[in-house]
Amino acid sequence: MIVHTDHYRVRIGSQDVELPLVPVSDDAAISLLMTIDRGVALLERAGRELAELLGGLRPDIVATNATLGIPVAIEVSRALGLDDYLVLQKTPKIHLGDALCEPLTSMTTAAPQLLRLDRARVGAVAGRRVVLVDDVIATGGSIAAALRLLRRVGAQVVAIGALLVEGGGWRDALGDDAALVHCLGSIPGFRRVEGGWAEVPG
């Protein structure tokens, strides 16, 4: 299918959402979900629906990567009746000087980054059943780094939840862990063609 506008309509669980098409190179684009730019109602409903997929796994805590996964983690935690969640940080804040770190790359960030786990928060996940959530899983690089970091401290990651998965490259990045992924929808990649953008299925 060829998209002739600068937006793409996607279904996130029971909700239809218009996402802007954003070029990432001269001939490729992504449909960009920015959770921090969406209303509370959309995230509350999506979080509840994602929690319904994950709740049977009896998680003790929800973990996520900063920044766009934070609204997802809050709403999934709330829907699961949990009062705590863990955020793996990307910014070297002053209290993270001795944090545990894992390198990561992301489709939406140009430079390599480090994912950080505050040592003061290790006890929140060590030996516990964890669901790892995020907004979109695209390349799988961020989720793979989070899995490595959580498992280093003895967390038992029982599931990975996402509002959307994009394309299919994430399956290779996650390997056997791809089987842990539960999502509310999927989006293709896009390549430039005459007159618009052609969907590139995963």
Image (cartoon, grey):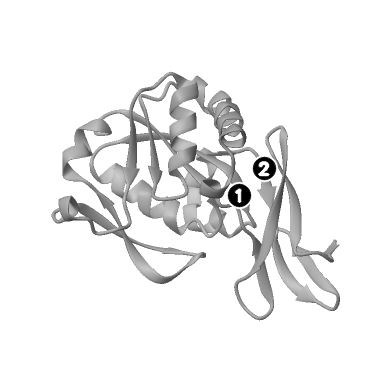
- Locate residue 54, reporting x and y percent: 52, 27
Q: Earlier in the sequence, mark 1 or mark 2?
A: 1
Residue 194 shown left or right of residue 17 in the figure:
right
SS for dot 2: loop
> Can you name the residue that lies furthest to the bottom here?
26
- Locate residue 162, reporting x and y percent: 54, 42
- Locate residue 33, reporting x and y percent: 60, 52
Q: Quadrant of the N terminus?
A: bottom right
* 42 w.r.t. 53: above or below: below
Distance from Cα at disc 1 to Cα at disc 2 = 7 Å
Q: Quadrant of the C terminus?
A: bottom right
Foreground residue among 137 and 159: 137
> Can you name the residue that lies furthest to the left here?
98
Please name the residue shown 75% across and 75% down the image.
192
Please name the residue shown 40% across and 25% down the image.
59
Tally of marks: 2
Q: Which residue is mark 1?
A: 165
Check contact, mark 1 vs mark 2: CB within 8 A.
yes
The answer to whether residue 159 is seen in the rendering is no
- Quadrant of residue 185 within the rendered picture: top right
Mark 1, Cα crowd under 10 Å, few <14 / some 14-19 / many 20+, is many
Mark 2, Cα crowd under 10 Å, few <14 / some 14-19 / many 20+, is some
* 38 w.r.t. 94: above or below: above
SS for dot 1: strand
- Locate residue 92, reporting x and y percent: 24, 59
Foreground residue among 183 and 70: 70
- Quadrant of residue 52 within the rendered picture: top right
Q: What kind of residue is marked 1?
A: Val
Q: Which residue is mark 2?
A: 185
Please name the residue shown 30% across and 36% down the image.
155
